[in-house]
Image: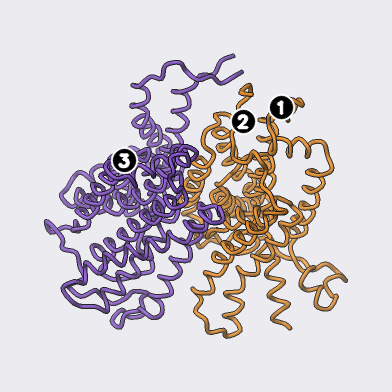
Chain colours: A orange, B purple
Amino acid sequence: MEFLISLLQASIRAGTPLLFATLGETITEKSGILNLGVEGLMIMGAMSGFALSFVTGNPWIGILAGGIAGLTLAFIHGFFSITLKVDQTVSGLMLVLFGMGLSGLMGKNYIGKVATYIDPISIPFLSSIPFLGKIFFTHDLLVYLSLLLTAFLWFILYKTSFGLSIIASGENPEAADTAGINVDFVRYICLLAGGFLIGVGGAYLSLAYAKLWTEGMTAGRGWICLALVIFSGWMPQRAVIGAYLFGGLDVQSFKLQAIGFTIPYQLLKMIPYIATILVLLLSLVREKYKLRAPSALGKPYFRGER
Amino acid sequence: MRIEKREEISRIKLYTLPFLSILASLVFVGILLLFVGVNPIEAYYIMLTRTFGSKLGLSELFVKSTPLILTGLAVAIPMRAGLWNIGAEGQLYMGAFIASYVALNFVNPFTIPAMFILAAIFGALWAFVPAILKAKFDLNEIISTLLLNYVAIYWVEYMVYGPMRGKEVYNFPYSDLFPECAILPRFFDTRLHLGILIAFSTVVVIYLIFRRTSFGFSVKVVGANPKAAEYAGIDRKKIIIYAMILGGAIAGIAGMEEISGIHHRLRAVISPGYGYAGIPIALLAKGNILAIVLSATLFGFLYVGGSALQTSYSIPIAVVYIFQSLVVLFIIGGEFFVRYKVVR
């Protein structure tokens, strides 16, 4: 029982960076832009967040810096994919390399350093509910914020006229343009906001989850988030399930080791990556009747080519 | 403000673009170096002299280019068929794993050919999984090839910490050293080894496949125009799978050649991102098979220079990634302005 509680509690914490990044990529893709650079944005977010928290002593400035780092890289992607309308795959992939390289170079002096971290807080009364209290109400503020954000994005996407513009830009940019929507503008907004969230996810990783900075510490999480967007059918509310599920798969390796499990650590570490492929496969088989990508996803929109 | 295609595309601009992009990337990286307190002119001087200033440096250039030529091909072949192979790193590790297994268990005159063939098969198998998922379920091959990299790297790590850990390595995560018959011969008292010839012959073979065979032709048609391929009666799915496993096999050979020519044992870290570097190498060469030798040599220089910076300034080798990505970004950005113009 104790083990289950600590596993579920840790799953939520490990799932939170995934949730931020999955939400960020979801709104990006909803507007029709495919940002394959998630991994690069996250690692830059992790490095910038750690560095700024180390320098200022305020982890919240770190989180903000992580977001801004993600936003900056997203802007580069926007310049190529929205303004120049070149291949989104190439520019996304190059952002991964760029982020990995730049974070390695800029972060080299922060390896092994101790920054100020974001600590969990127990919510009075709620956290003392048996079983559930410890799992759900002993986290840091960002965990709750990420859930509020999920609801907020759901509201924006499905209940506001701006949400309609986003969906229209992603589904049928020609029609959106005819209806007077500035497709490029909508896409920039979504890409930059999404980049900010992905960067925050990265900063959460170094400042609240792992509480350290190492080169390449995102370890493929950005790619897992790209798969989670598909898994959740491009719906923010469903991203929560995927993120916590993969948070669980992320922490199982040391949780199981801690209780004396004898399966080698490296084999347990493979599980999230294999599971991601399986989950993708599952979503694609199911896609036939429900889940569907935005129709114009990844396709540049040229005005006046109708 | 609108974007318009240019009537005439300047050839001179198109051909000078790669060089300008390399220059621009050098300037950009230079600024970043300044930012971390390194004098960029001094750094570039070190990179050049360490590479071209001695027999050893020059040989290292070819040593680093060897796996890069192969991983460049591993990305370029599927790219010609319209597919992304982001998994060359994992395919390389799987090739290295099986080559080491053969080296440590089968001691006979055919050890090296057996390592070579099995490494190609394992690399191909590692690429086959994403390829079949792509062909059957349209599962995004970028994500699947990439994720399998982590699986392969953890597999090798598991092997060197567990079943394949050597008896004479004092708890280091290494296998034992290979026997003599599993080691590629070296030349000129340097680390330059037979792998360079393997890499060059692979380039020639692949070039001939693309020039002379119907398979090569089909790959090009599928990549350039899937609809036309269908009308021509080409089985697109089959071509996708073949192109991908051919790429995987070559990346597997890169793993064998690194393990048998350089490391002489299996270790947890075999490649400083050679598989990932294959992507910008193939992009820079525009999928052109012969041009891959050139772009791989440029990147080989970056790796030799990068390790020189690592020893001189303790700059992580990851700085090479910055340069790689910038070159490609400058090229695709620059190409836009060569082909299009902005009109008001």
In the visual, does A9 lie left or right of B78? right
Q: Residues within 10 Å of mark 1 (few under 14, many from 20)?
A: some
Can the viewer see residue B316 in this picture? no
Q: Quadrant of the N terminus of chain A?
A: bottom right
- Res B29 → quadrant: top left
> In this orientation, which residue lies closer to the viewer: A121 or B128?
B128
In the visual, does B148 lie left or right of B272? right
What residue is shown with label 1? Answer: A177
Q: CA distance from mark 1 to mark 3?
A: 49 Å
What residue is shown with label 2? Answer: A301
- Mark 3: which amino acid? Tyr
Same chain, labels 1 and 3: no
> In this orientation, which residue lies closer to the viewer: B16 or A200?
B16
Q: Residue at x 68, y 29 (%)?
A: A174
> In this orientation, which residue lies closer to the viewer: A237 or A49?
A237
Q: Secondary structure at mark 2?
A: loop
- Percent position (x, y) of residue B123? 37, 62
Whether pointer 2 and pointer 1 mark residues with C-beta atoms closer than 8 Å, the reply is yes
Q: Residues within 10 Å of mark 3 (few under 14, many from 20)?
A: some
What residue is shown with label 3? Answer: B44
- Percent position (x, y) of residue B337? 47, 24
Q: From the viewer's perspective, is residue A240 above or below residue A41?
A: below
Chain ID for label 1? A
- Mark 1: which amino acid? Asp
Q: Which circle, 3 or 2, is nearer the viewer?
A: 2
Chain ID for label 2? A
Q: Secondary structure at mark 3?
A: helix
Residue at the farthest right position: A125
Q: CA distance from mark 2 to mark 1?
A: 10 Å
